[in-house]
Image (spheres, helix red, strand yellow):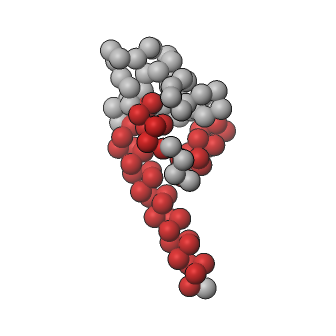
Amino acid sequence: MFFFRDVTSGLIINEYRNYLDWGKAMISLFIIATGESWNYVMFDCMITEPNCEPGVTCGTSFAPIYYMTFVMVVQNVMLNLFVLVIIS
């Protein structure tokens, strides 16, 4: 929420999928964990000045690192859970 709270509008980020409060942030991260358009959310969050509108579309340059790390870790956990179900 700290890094992306200023991004309230974009290609994928809207009134339901954003980082304005804890609940919406968790829903957004859950959707990203399923693999649903996570790269578009990353592109929405990595727009920085002078190409953004302050308070509406300004993100951070930290977004690619955050999202790629998050997706790799979560998908690794999901893969391990899937393999565990098959083995047992």
As drawn, is 68 to the left or to the right of 13? left
Tell me if 81 is positioned left or right of 47 in this view: right
Q: Residue at x 36, y 23 (%)?
A: 48
User: Which residue corresponds to the image point at 54% horizontal and 23% vertical from the top-left?
Assistant: 9
> Is 62 placed left or right of 20 in the picture?
left
Examine the rendered structure and indicate whether residue 83 appears above or below residue 19: below
Q: Is residue 80 above or below residue 57?
A: below
Task: Determine the residue positioned at 39% across, 48% down.
Answer: 68
- The picture places residue 6, in percent across and down from the top left corner, at 50, 23
> For this rendering, which residue is in front, 40 or 75?
40
Q: Is residue 80 above or below residue 9?
A: below
Q: Residue at x 48, y 60 (%)?
A: 75
As drawn, 3 above or below 81: above
Q: At which x and y percent is residue 57?
A: 47, 21
Locate the C terminus by quadrant. Answer: bottom right
Q: Position of residue 69 (x, y in %)?
A: 39, 51
